[in-house]
Amino acid sequence: MERSENLPPQNTILLVEDLHRSGFRFLPRFWLRDHGYCVLEATNGLEALHRARTHQGPIDLLIAEIDLPFMDGRELAAHIRSLFPPVRIMFVVPETSPIPASPRWAAFLRKPLDSHILLKKIQSLIGKGVERLHATA
């Protein structure tokens, strides 16, 4: 789908979760799209890195499970930050796992995710998507 010249740019989120372990997606990709974000998807760290390298434009936020196949979330974040230095990072951790010490540029959320808390966290990291851009235009 081609974007119209008069539409504001969308914030881009790279969403990475291991489908092989869970069997289905926990992260609400369609819901994020409904809130005005461009969503790229990957099922492991290597695929995510490939998506980032081939994407035309910036990536504003990486949302990734901390435990991913082929390349864990922290290693993926380091690679993505080298490609897109201003990117923000949000790690998703299992409900029973402790949340590790967090660098200033990263946030952590626990599964199961509450969509309203997720949206507020995203908005605090990168803005409100298209709705915010329309309000300020």
Image (cartoon, rainbow, N blue to C red):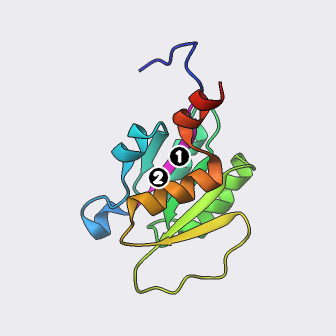
Magenta stretch, main secondary structure class: strand
Nearer-the-camera pick, 122 or 23: 122
Q: Would residue 45 be counted in the magenta stretch?
A: no
Q: Are marks 2 and 1 in contact (CB under 8 Å)?
A: yes
Question: x, y (%) of residue 46?
Answer: 50, 55
Q: Residue farthest to the left?
A: 23
Q: Residue at x 50, y 61 (%)?
A: 64
Residue at coordinates 57% horizontally, 12% vertically from top-left?
A: 5
Residue 98 position in % (x across, y down): 52, 87
- 24 relative to 67, above or below: above
The answer to whether 6 appears left or right of 85 in the picture is left
- Front-lying residue, 84 or 135: 135
Q: Where does the N terminus fall, quadrant-wise? A: top left
User: Which label number is shown at residue 13?
Assistant: 1
Residue drawn at point x = 51 percent, y = 14 percent = 4
* Residue 31 spot, x, y in % from top left: 36, 46
Around disc 2, counting alpha carbons within 10 Å, would you say few (fewer than 14), some (14 to 19), or many (20 or more)?
Answer: many
Image quarter of residue 128: top right
Which residue position is annotated with label 2? Answer: 15
Q: Which of 38 and 81 is in front in this view?
A: 38
Local SS, label 1? strand
User: Which quadrant would the C terminus be assigned to in this image?
Assistant: top right
Amino acid carrying mark 1 in the image = Ile
Question: Going by the image, does 93 lie left or right of 62?
Answer: left
Mark 2: amino acid: Leu
Disc 2 is placed on an element classified as: strand
Q: Is residue 89 left or right of residue 37?
A: right
* Boundaries of the magenta span: 10-17
Residue at 34 percent across and 43 percent down: it is 30
Vertical position of residue 37 compared to residue 110: above or below: above
